[in-house]
């Protein structure tokens, strides 16, 4: 099919939910993508923080192909060796004793919400979950309720009860909302969809300490920030805290759909037989892919990507010299460049694409950078040079 036919089929048959760029990707190689016309782009989107190994990584690709030949899927009515091996490895690497494997971030977060409710109902209590304004936790009804997009709330009301929110990074508002009905706090360490906004160290440490002092569960959505994205295996490590629950997806299997909810022994055993489940969650193919990802991360990629992430941060820091750059923020290989409202981020995105670089626009008029963890210093230098060139031309306008 040529590009025109591809777009025609999309317009005729796909539900109209995606505002797609005028770009059709055909294949990937290394840290680059190639479109249907053969144009090459260095990828600083990585499937929105998913393709952390880039494309056609030799070890990962060989593992996945082998597993397809051996076994892709059987019901969770049965044990499989690969699932058992992987959850043991993930438990050892994370320090969380209990794991449930799902298919996506929204499913992992749904599992967390159900687990929190079950935990307190086992005690005869009904509790509320406190989330942050500006968060993004998924597109199911419950995860949408936990997300801070009030416009979407109006579209899909009535929504499930049991959630309330506090102002982002505002500890005084957080304290005022931490009323006796709250059983758990659920947040991202870095709000990705809202423009790569990290919570401050002071907020995170004080919020965590307050929850611990009151017996309130502390849960962290690591769907976008986990699996090495910030320079640590999990972003909560950057703050020196230990949550009761974390959720993972996106990068966990480097492109094969997978999610996970991890919990402490006390919280993770709140479920009883039949309380939760999944047809595809934790199938053999996804577990083999995730097992390879974890081996590659712990085998050296985590350390090297932390160094490259620091390099990226240092290279971007000089952009503050341009008066239309409002802020440059983030951690590791998760960075945001917020532009003045006078300069639409979508224009920057388009100009970078013309120069062979794919980036993503997030909230607050922010260019979001989420490259594969295999991104090279040379590829970063090329991106920053292209940004500088666009900024210089913008200054002249």
Image (cartoon, rainbow, N blue to C red):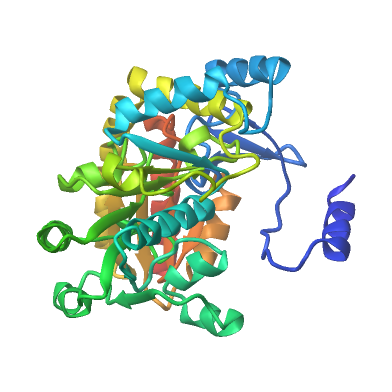
Q: Is residue 146 above or below residue 354?
A: below
Q: x, y percentage for residue 381?
A: 38, 38
The one of 175 and 126 positioned closer to us in this rendering: 126
Q: Taking the image as drawn, is residue 79 in sight?
A: yes
With 232 as the anchor, is 355 left or right in this view? right
On the image, which quarter does residue 181 sit in?
bottom left
Q: Residue at x 35, y 77 (%)?
A: 164
Q: x, y percentage for residue 215?
A: 17, 60
| Placement of the N terminus among the 4 image quadrants | top right
The one of 104 and 167 positioned closer to us in this rendering: 104
Q: Residue at x 37, y 74 (%)?
A: 340
With 98 as the anchor, is 44 left or right in this view? right
On the image, which quarter does residue 115 sit in?
bottom left
Q: Is residue 66 above or below residue 36?
A: above
Q: x, y percentage for residue 123?
A: 29, 60
Q: Residue at x 53, y 78 (%)?
A: 159
Q: x, y percentage for residue 288?
A: 55, 23
Q: Is residue 347 above or below residue 54?
A: below
Q: Residue at x 68, y 63 (%)?
A: 18
Q: Taking the image as drawn, is residue 359 in sight?
A: no
């Amino acid at each position: 099919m040529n590009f025109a036919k591809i777009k025609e089929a999309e317009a005729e048959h796909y539900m109209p939910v995606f505002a797609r760029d005028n770009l059709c990707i055909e294949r990937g190689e290394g840290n680059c993508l190639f479109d249907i016309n053969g144009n090459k782009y260095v990828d600083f989107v990585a499937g929105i923080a998913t393709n952390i190994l880039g494309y056609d990584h030799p070890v990962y690709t060989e593992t996945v192909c082998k597993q397809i030949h051996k076994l892709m899927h059987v019901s969770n009515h049965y044990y499989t060796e690969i699932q058992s091996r992987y959850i043991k490895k993930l438990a050892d690497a994370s320090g969380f004793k209990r794991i449930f494997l799902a298919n996506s971030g929204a499913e992992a977060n749904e599992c967390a919400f159900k687990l929190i409710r079950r935990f307190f109902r086992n005690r005869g209590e009904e509790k509320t979950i406190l989330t942050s304004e500006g968060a993004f936790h998924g597109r199911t009804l419950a995860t949408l309720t936990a997300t801070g997009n009030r416009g979407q709330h109006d579209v899909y009301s009535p929504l499930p009860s049991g959630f309330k929110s506090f102002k982002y990074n505002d500890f005084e508002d957080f304290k005022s909302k931490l009323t006796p009905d709250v059983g758990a706090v659920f947040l991202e360490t870095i709000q990705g969809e809202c423009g790569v906004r990290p919570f401050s160290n002071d907020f995170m440490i004080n919020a965590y300490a307050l929850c611990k002092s009151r017996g309130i569960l502390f849960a962290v959505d690591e769907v976008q920030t986990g699996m090495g994205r910030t320079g640590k295996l999990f972003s909560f490590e950057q703050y020196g805290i230990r949550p009761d629950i974390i959720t993972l997806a996106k990068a966990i299997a480097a492109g094969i759909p997978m999610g996970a909810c991890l919990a402490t022994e006390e919280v993770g055993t709140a479920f009883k037989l039949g309380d939760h489940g999944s047809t595809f969650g934790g199938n053999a193919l996804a577990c083999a892919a995730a097992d390879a990802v974890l081996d590659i991360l712990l085998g050296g990629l985590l350390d090297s990507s932390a160094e490259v992430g620091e390099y990226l941060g240092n290279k971007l820091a000089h952009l503050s010299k341009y008066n239309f750059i409002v802020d440059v923020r983030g951690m590791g290989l998760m960075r945001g460049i917020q532009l003045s409202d006078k300069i639409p981020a979508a224009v920057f995105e388009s100009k970078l694409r013309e120069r062979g670089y794919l980036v993503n626009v997030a909230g607050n008029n922010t260019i979001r950078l989420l490259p594969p963890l295999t991104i090279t210093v040379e590829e970063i230098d090329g991106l920053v040079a292209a940004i500088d060139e666009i900024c210089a031309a913008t200054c002249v306008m």
